Amino acid sequence: MKSPFAAIAETGVEWWLQAYLCADRTTCKPLLDAAVLAGAKAIVLTVDTPIIGTKHDGAAGSVWDSVDPRWLQVNFPDGYGSSPGDEKATDLGAHDIAWLRETTGLPVVVKGVLRGDDARRCVDAGASAIWVSNHGGRQLDFLGRLPLYALAVDGSKGVSRLLSELDVELVEAMRLSGCSTLGSVGPGLLLGAEGASKPVRE
């Protein structure tokens, strides 16, 4: 359950606001203003989940499905989430770091950075710190033996279905990796490629 900003401030601890920007940045401003008013010391801009990765964990609902929505939006203004532009931004860029600094007057920490060149771009844009994170590895999965399984289970139809689903998942993976075109998928993102990290073998 999320806590009201005022309740956090009453504890006397120093705290930061982890923010997910909205497609319409002005939608986020009331939340940011409230955090500043309550004494937040920094804004953490999360950049590694422009979309939520698909989960294949059965039909059971997540914890978010069973929690009263009022508990999740306790710090948001009434009506948040019901208007165009309230959805999560998919076009985050260096300009958002500057916008957050100017809007809040607080240091901006960029969370979800894994590449050195991206870290440098964030610092050049005004980030006060970089938070190296891959969201716990919970958002982006990788392809294994699925083509063989698909062929064994349903022949050519199974493979066709797999390829269609992979097309959707490729777009999802590129968005989560920050790549707008296939040409921007460099060696650093490919396991085993020259210059990339090698898998650990026992």
Image (cartoon, rainbow, N blue to C red):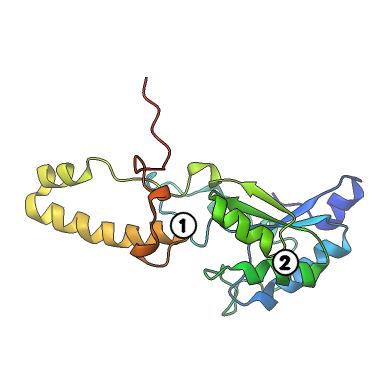
Residue 42 location, quadrant: bottom right
- For label 2, the SS is loop
| The C terminus sits in image quarter | top left
Three-letter residue code for mark 1: Leu
- For label 1, the SS is helix
For marks 2 and 1 on the same chain, the one whose residue lies earlier in the sequence? 2
Residue 149 location, quadrant: top left
Q: Residues within 10 Å of mark 2 (few under 14, many from 20)?
A: some
Query: How many marks overall?
Result: 2
Residue 40 location, quadrant: bottom right
Judge from the rendering whether residue 150 lies leftward or rightward of residue 49; answer left or right: left
Disc 2 or disc 1, which is closer to the eye? 1
Which residue: 58% across, 51% down?
112
Residue 149 in the image: above or below residue 124: above
Three-letter residue code for mark 2: Phe
Q: Position of residue 175 (x, y in %)?
A: 44, 62
Q: Position of residue 64 (x, y in %)?
A: 56, 52
Q: Position of residue 26 (x, y in %)?
A: 69, 78
Q: Position of residue 165 (x, y in %)?
A: 26, 58
Per the image, the residue denoted by label 1 is 176
Residue 85 in the image: above or below residue 45: below
Per the image, the residue denoted by label 2 is 76
